[in-house]
Image (tube, rainbow, N blue to C red):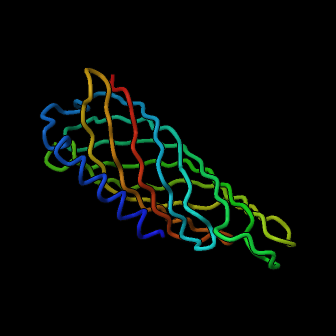
């Protein structure tokens, strides 16, 4: 089932390719700031948890034609794939994160690779065991393309891998998001 969802997401991104390639205007000019809200499917590395949505907001700047930065806050809430009445089975997981990213715009275009780090917080509840919470280091990286939809509106599909480094949750997750933003 997970592979079907990933395949559908890949086809949707491929269908957007003509729109991306047709855009000639730079979505965010050098020196401009941008504010975005984002959301999309989130595939947790913990196989007991089902795919759910990630959501949040980003703020950043493109100070140089090939270099940018971004700050991001977001959240997610997962339910288990199967509700097993087994001792220790995961019943619910909630997470929050704050990241800082560095973005390289290839050749000064709207196509960018990014990498960053931040802090995350995870709350997990288990069947007939105490709930566990922890703060964790998160490291992320990915690729995105940004283009202008209107004079100051930008649209950005993004693929991101997020590595959570903690004792309770130490997994690599996948995010496929789209954001709508304003550059100024």
Indicate the position of residue 14 as horizontal and vertical percent values: 24, 54
Left or right: residue 85 versus residue 118 is right
Vertical placement of residue 39 versus 181, above or below: below
Q: How many marks?
A: 0
Q: Residue at x 72, y 61 (%)?
A: 92
Instruction: Work out whether residue 115 or residue 84 is closer to the camera in this orientation and state it.
Output: 84
Q: Residue at x 48, y 54 (%)?
A: 41
Residue 66, image quadrant: top left
Residue 115, image quadrant: bottom left
Indicate the position of residue 155 as horizontal and vertical percent values: 32, 36
Residue 116, image quadrant: bottom left
Q: Residue at x 56, y 55 (%)?
A: 52
Indicate the position of residue 168 as horizontal and vertical percent values: 69, 70
Instruction: Work out whether residue 19 or residue 157 is closer to the camera in this orientation and state it.
Output: 19
Instruction: Work out whether residue 181 or residue 19 is closer to the camera in this orientation and state it.
Output: 19
Q: Residue at x 31, y 31 (%)?
A: 154
Indicate the position of residue 138 as horizontal and vertical percent values: 53, 60
Say which quadrant the C terminus sits in: top left
């Amino acid at each position: 089932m997970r592979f079907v969802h990933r395949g559908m997401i890949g086809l949707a991104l491929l269908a957007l390719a003509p729109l991306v390639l047709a855009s000639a205007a730079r979505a965010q000019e050098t020196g401009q700031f941008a504010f975005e809200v984002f959301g999309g499917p989130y595939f947790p590395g913990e196989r007991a948890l089902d795919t759910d949505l990630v959501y949040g907001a980003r703020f950043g700047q493109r100070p140089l034609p090939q270099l940018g930065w971004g700050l991001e806050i977001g959240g997610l809430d997962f339910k288990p794939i199967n509700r097993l009445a087994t001792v220790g089975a995961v019943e619910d997981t909630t997470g929050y994160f704050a990241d800082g990213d560095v973005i390289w715009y290839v050749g000064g275009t709207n196509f960018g690779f990014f990498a960053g780090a931040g802090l995350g917080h995870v709350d997990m509840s288990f069947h007939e065991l105490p709930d566990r919470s922890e703060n964790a280091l998160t490291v992320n990286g990915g690729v995105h393309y940004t283009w202008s939809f209107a004079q100051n509106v930008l649209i950005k599909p993004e693929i991101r891998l997020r590595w959570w480094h903690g004792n309770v949750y130490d997994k690599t997750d996948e995010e496929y998001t789209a954001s709508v933003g304003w550059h100024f």
